[in-house]
Amino acid sequence: MIKKILIANRGEIALRILRACKDLGIKTVAVHSTADADAMHVRLADESVCIGPASPRESYLNIPAIISAACITGADAVHPGFGFLSENPTFAHMVEEHGLIFIGPKADHIVMMGDKIMAKKTVSRLGLPTVPGSDGALTKLDKAIKLADDMGYPVLIKAAGGGGGRGMKVARSNEEFVEAYETARREAGISFGNDVVYLEKYLENPKHIEFQVIADQYGNAVHLGERDCSMQRRNQKVWEEAPSMVLSPEFRNEFGRKIAKAISEMGYVGVGTLEFLYENGQLYFIEMNTRIQVEHPITEMITGIDIVREQILIADGQKLSFTQDDVTFTGHAIECRINAENPDTYIPSAGTVAKYHCPGGPGVRVDSFVYEGYKIPPYYDSLIAKLVIHGKDRQQCLARLRRALNEYVISGVDTLIPLHLRLANDPRIIEGNFDIHFLESFSKNLKLK
Ligand code: ADP
């Protein structure tokens, strides 16, 4: 059995992993940059190691420092969390090379899904529908224009190595296409070190629907239902719900089982998320994330399954403790990402948290590392808390969400709490009537008022 885990991350996900370890009786090692010496994940871990200066490149992305910390402290496994090194196959490989367990999928699967072209080809071969587009990379401009013409505008040029909502350009005509193609390639080369791009039909009003999967080392794969993550700004999620309001139980069951079968055939091990766009009653695969996701708690709320705990047990070589038939969905859950950002402009807001009061009561879970007097460093992601609400149905969930948002006090820095309150009171949200463009136009209208 794994006895000690090094958590190669910071912030709320480091705490989330630490909590799963404590519940399992596993010792924890926190790593931190000099800027995070006072952080909660460092305070609550059994041991901690400073791995470098504030800059992520020199600390949380510093592979030799992290592996040395694991070896020195005698950890037998490494949990990468999300972001940072979680989808870095070199890191996964090096962890294993040093005789440690990487809590995540095999490096080969990270490589396969890290290349979005390969990911689409793989799931398509396994029988899942993908967004219509080019059959691989775009290599020549004239051929690409011809393909866009044949597909019909609008189209989306995407970076094969893209992520974090970056590396995408929409084109609505031949003229726009030439510029979008060149810009997409150039930006992809700079941002991802890989200028390979591909083409997809740009869906005008889709919802973002993703399925959570989990698979053990013995070919048992199960889906845990879907999440609606359509509420996005700059292609990044800020509010997520489970289940979605558009899939019927029959559709979920049938499609979910198809996905689980594909995962099992792939030989995938660990947790993962297959992301789809939903339009006109159809789901189209866009990409797979081979790690735990920010929004995993809403799935935990409706299934009662501790996904991080299961992830650790799978890495330890244990069999999945439940089958597909054991998975049931109860009620509705919503997660609001509380970012330290201006709620109108989304400009990050670093500084000291002057007052902090956390909401509570029935159906309320807060995953956060913030406390009164905590100094939010300017070097990292702006996510400081996740407010996760559960109710017997969506209506109760929204009522509890409004209550919790009204109770939540974070002063000294800007947060998205006021934005979430406006969203939770908006009649279109209450009706469940929104797609991936909703928040952009909502924010624009807010600014005009
Ligand atoms: P990333 O890896 O950067 O998150 P994704 O491929 O997952 O990129 O896409 C992120 C978001 O961009 C989606 O949730 C959706 O809002 C939008 N998007 C991606 N592909 C398309 C498409 N073909 N048509 C319309 N919107 C898209």
Image (cartoon, rainbow, N blue to C red):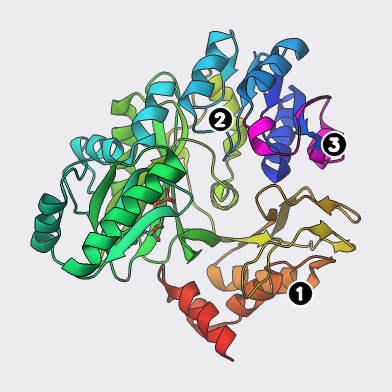
Residue depicted at x 61% and y 39%: 306
Secondary structure under the numbered disc 2 in the rendered image: helix
Q: Please state if 31 lies on the left or on the right of 101 as rendered.
A: right
Locate residue 113, reporting x and y percent.
36, 35
Q: Quadrant of the N terminus?
A: top right
Q: Which residue is mark 2?
A: 311
Which mark, residue 406? 1
Residue depicted at x 74% and y 36%: 19
Q: Earlier in the sequence, mark 1 or mark 3?
A: 3
Number of residues whose C-alpha sits closer than 10 Å to that of mark 1, classed few (under 14), some (14–19) or many (20 or more): few
Tell me the quarter of the picture where residue 359 sits: bottom right
The three-letter amino acid code for the residue at tag 1 is Asn
Which mark, residue 375? none
Q: Is mark 3 within 8 Å of ligand 1?
A: no
Secondary structure under the numbered disc 3 in the rendered image: loop
Locate residue 239, reporting x and y percent.
56, 63
The three-letter amino acid code for the residue at tag 2 is Gln
Q: CA distance from mark 3 to mark 2?
A: 27 Å
Q: Quadrant of ligand 1?
A: bottom left
Locate residue 171, reporting x and y percent.
26, 66
Comparing 371 with 116, the one in front is 116
Which mark, residue 37? 3
Instruction: Give the mark toward the camera: 3 or 2.
Output: 3
The three-letter amino acid code for the residue at tag 3 is Ala
49 magenta-colored: yes
Locate residue 139, reporting x and y percent.
18, 43
Q: CA distance from mark 1 to mark 3?
A: 32 Å
Q: Is residue 212 visible?
A: no
362 magenta-colored: no
What is the span of residues highlighted in magenta in the rendered image? 35-61
Q: CA distance from mark 1 to mark 2?
A: 34 Å
